[in-house]
Image: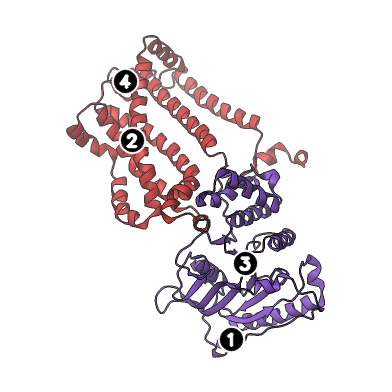
Chain colours: A purple, B red
Amino acid sequence: MGSLTMNASPQTAAGSRVVMTETIKANNPAGTTHAAGDQRSAGTTMAIEDVTLRYGDANGVLALDDVSLKVAKNEFCVIVGPSGCGKSSLLYLAAGLNDATSGSIRVGGREVIEPGPDRGMVFQSYTLFPWLTVRANIEYGPKRKGLPAEQRRQVVDQYLNEVGLAPFADHYPAQLSGGMKQRVAIARALANDPAVLLMDEPFGALDSQTRGTMQKLLLRVWERQQKTVLFVTHDIDEALVLGDRVLVMTARPGKIKAEIKVDIPRPRSMDVILEPDFIALKRRILGLLHDEIDEDH
Amino acid sequence: MAQRRTAWTRLTTPFANIPASTATTLALAMWIAVIGGWALLSYGRVVPNMFLPTPGTVLQTAYRMSLDGSLFYHTFTSAKVVILGFIVSSVIAVPLGLWMGTYRAVQAPLEPLVNFIRYLPVTSFVPLFILWIGIGIEQRIAVIFFGTFFQQLVMISDCARSVSRDLVNASYTLGTKRSEAVWHVIFPAALPAILDTLRVTMGWAWTYLVVAELVAASSGLGYISLKAMRGFQVDVIFMAIAAIGLLGLITDTAFRILRARVAPWAA
């Protein structure tokens, strides 16, 4: 955990404590709003309230400073921020893998106190169980849950097909490429039917072409499965291609600096990055992030 | 591509693979060199045969002792001691080491003590074991146990501790309970490394065998070595050493096969 928040000098600028929240609507032709948009705003799946994270004692490094955010049901919410801003730490807190110094996190109305299968997670590092085949990896969660064998087989087959890896069902993770491993990791997390899917730079270790393929796949899966996703990345293109909403975080101590609604119609293709709306949003976020990086040095 | 590199380039490239046939040839050449050198020194009388027997004499001795069954008898006794000592040690060291590597609360009390005992020479405990346990097979098993257990414990604890944190974290997000993590995640993840540890410590167990048998035993390969020394039967000593080496080679291979079988996913 400590390694997630290295290499940022303590920041004291009082000005950065003012949270600038803004909503930028892209020039969106009328009538293209995603049908699921209304449904998505129906309820809050995850609520993070006044979360502060400090490592060590009271004088320790402040990693997260009073972060609050809500993720609506079936929303795809993305957090971008400079490296070391604590965005991954926030995800670990939401998963219950670490304890916040103060504040609360609720998922489906219940306080997060420890990790649980209602919060699936895809990690940046490869975390497939190397001793299990692809099929057995995906089956792991449903098995822990006590799902009968026949239902497990159906679920596994469904998600194997969803990520296009049915022919590799009996392979071991060591036999797969990096992109395939992350596809299995996504399938494994989804097969458990979590209330929220936490994704910690899942494509960060992949080459840029594979990353594009993975984003497309994730979009397709998400559009079909309708899941609540909280996705962390430092890649602005990735954030805008995937997200309904992008939260920009400050450099350490991490705070939510701005909220940007991405009104680009769905289903989105990868070509969306060439469109003027997209570029306008990207410029906006780049500006916000550059302020952070400049302040930091 | 491969054709453009000369065989010499390939042999001298760090970490480069060499053909299996080349590897086998090199291994055989090494053995031929060692046995050849031995033959040269002994047949050429460079070293008197009283100190260095000829390969022929050692083979003859092995043949003679095979015929009267004594070679098998002593080998069996020794193997029994080593295997029993090793099994008793492993059966305790694997679960305890897993616990030690997993829970700081187990590691904190055990580690200082284990590291203290680990550096004590096994030989210095032989008189004590004789006093406490007597001179039966139990005493020899105790020597093997004492020699391997504490090393195993520390090494297996390290195997468990080096399991990726995110692997355990991922299992939690999939519904694994804290109490299940050791068995469901840490044990299988550490298994290849644990099997390697067992293979290495099995080799150490063989080396402690002679220590165990030199002092108090009436059978076994170490025992016949000692008896042979008193009678200047250098050929018997050589044969006993060769037998131990061969048994070591066999157990090592057995462990490699076991690892390939039990953990086929690990390269």
Alpha-carbon distance for marks 4 and 1?
A: 84 Å
- Eye-nearest disc, 1 or 3: 3
Q: Could you tell me how far apart the alpha carbons at marks 2 and 1 are, in whole angstroms? A: 64 Å
Q: Of residues B2 and A56, which is closer to you in this image?
A: A56
On the image, numbered disc 4 is attached to which residue? B224
Three-letter code, disc 3 = Thr
The location of residue B30, given as percent across then percent down, is 55, 29
Q: Which residue is mark 2?
A: B88
Question: Residue at coordinates 57% horizontally, 77% vertically from top-left?
Answer: A69
Q: Residue A120 in the image: state x and y as whole percent.
A: 56, 60
Q: Is residue A77 above or below residue B223?
A: below
Q: Secondary structure at mark 1?
A: loop
Report the residue at 63% width, 62% height from top: A202
Check disc 1 and report the residue beneath it. Answer: A19
Q: Residues within 10 Å of mark 3 (few under 14, many from 20)?
A: many
* Disc 2 versus disc 1: nearer the observer: 1
Comparing labels 2 and 4, the label whose residue is closer to the camera: 2
Q: Which residue is mark 3?
A: A228
* Residue A187: % across, % down: 63, 54
Mark 1–mark 3 Cα distance, whole angstroms, equals 25 Å
Q: Are marks 1 and 3 on the same chain?
A: yes
